[in-house]
Amino acid sequence: MACVLAGCLTKSAQFPFHFWLPDAMEAPTPASAYLHSATMVKAGIYLLLRLDPAFGAQAVWAVPLVAVGAATMLAAAVQALRHTGFKAVLAYTTVASLGTLVLLAGLDHPTASVAAIGFILAHAFYKACLFFVAGTAIHAAGTKDIPGMGGLAPYLPMTALAAVLAGLSMAGLPPFGGFIAKELVFEAKLADGWLVLALGVGVLVSAAMVAVAFVAALRPFFLKPPRPLGEVRPESPGLYLGPLVLAACGIAMGVAPGLLNGPVLAPAAAAISAGPTGAYFKLWHGLTPMLAMSAAAIALGGLLAWKWDSVHRRLAAIPALDLLSPQALYTGTMAGVLGFGRHLTDRLQDGRLRVYALVLFGVAAAVLAKGLAASGGPQLPDMTVANRPYAWLFAALLVVGALGAALSRNLLATLLAVGLVGYAVALLFLKTGAPDLAFTQFAVETLFVVIVTAVLLRL
């Protein structure tokens, strides 16, 4: 379970492994819209949800999901408010949305499965649309930063319409699919007893998403540009049809949610909950605590959008928040790995061959000793003087030669001691019925001693 969690959380850009997703926004806009908002990043979420019926009852599975999901939501929401790049801001809101889905995967209530399906659909519709819109706006304005954009609506009217519709869905306003998804998320948190997460993390993160939605949908198109616009290429149907279709799907999900209940929601929620849930999508739930929380998030998000520049400057000026940024985490991790490597190298790689040989032979001896101990100890042959009087003599020669080779500081003496070990082994072969091995050993040992001695004397 721990290994599966690590793989899924990394794939789904969860804190502290979330740094790869904002960096991937350098990709072309269609790749960002398709892979980074809807498809690739959901692969880890999909696996978590499919495995939840088997692992969901285990605390080692559920508690990390809730904790990591909540931490990811908060960290990503703060970073979304601190950045100015259009696609970077959207990328951080995607990380926050993935944190929401991970948190839902950790909740043990049937409503959580319905909320996860609804949020996956709504998020895919509005976020893919906004990524397409971002690419068009960046190309038209000639800058990636939202503060540098403005006044694009007369030149890109259809793109502006798609941006507004997707932004309203992302903000969770009715009658869009984002409103249904947000209501279900709040309901799942309250139904599972996570009141603190619902009231604290949920409202704050939702407010940040509302602020980003308003800024991304309105500022590039309807606010006065900070500088006169140059030549803006008119939009073509190939640029605005895709975002409009996605925005229309978000409206259809809110206006006619029953279209998704039978073919999509029921089987998907049943697969996650290991049985029918009885829940379904609907636009109006009545005057509920979820509606009050949604209204509070929209109000707070509207205030953040109104004071966007001030909030951005204040958050960007807090150095401690840089520790939550992907770049700081990646840089700090790499610096720690390299520093540990240097420390380890200084301790182990001291340039002395004797130390390396000692480590290698010490490990080999320890492994052999462990194997002998596990097998009940070595089975020694009969070494009595009556049966094999020569054995003790050969053993003594072996020990003397080995100790002499290890302790001698003279290279020539060390070489002769090693030769003594080889000759003792050859004598042992000769006396135990292996004359062919003995003669080979004698020849090899003689050649070794003579040749290496000649080389040493020559050098």
Image (cartoon, helix red, strand yellow):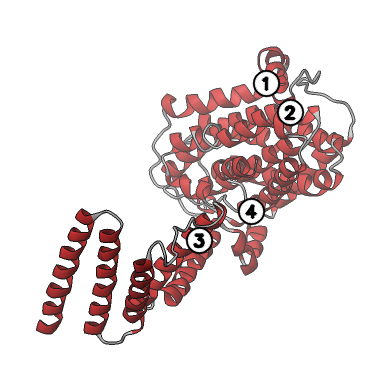
Q: Report, in whole angstroms, how far the alpha carbon at label 2 lies from the one at label 4.
A: 29 Å
Amino acid at dot 1: Ala
Which residue is depicted at the point 41% across and 28% down? 236
Q: Residue furthest front?
A: 386
Would you identify the image quadrant in which residue 220 lies? top right
Is residue 245 placed above or below 126 in the rendered structure?
Answer: above
Which of marks 1 and 4 precedes in the sequence? 4
- For residue 76, side relative to residue 451 (left or right): right
Numbered mark located on residue 113 in the image: 2
Numbered mark located on residue 81 in the image: 4
| Secondary structure of the residue carrying numbered label 1 | helix
Which residue is depicted at the point 70% across and 12% down? 262
Amino acid at dot 4: Leu
Crowding near pointer 4: few (<14 within 10 Å), some, many (20+)? Answer: many
Which residue is depicted at the point 72% across and 22% down? 269
Viewer-side residue, 96 vs 170: 96
Q: Residue 453: where, in percent of width, then height?
A: 15, 78
Would you identify the image quadrant in which residue 433 lies? bottom left
Is residue 153 placed above or below 415 in the rendered structure?
Answer: above
Is residue 79 placed above or below 445 in the rendered structure?
Answer: above
Mark 1 lies on residue = 268
Amino acid at dot 3: Ala
Which of label 2 and label 4 is nearer to you?
2
Q: Report, in whole angstroms, how far the alpha carbon at label 2 lies from the one at label 1.
A: 8 Å
Crowding near pointer 2: few (<14 within 10 Å), some, many (20+)? Answer: many
Q: Residue 391: where, in percent of width, then height?
A: 37, 66
Which of marks 3 and 1 precedes in the sequence? 1
| Secondary structure of the residue carrying numbered label 2 | helix
Q: Report, in whole angstroms, how far the alpha carbon at label 4 lies from the one at label 1.
A: 34 Å
Which of label 3 and label 2 is nearer to you?
3
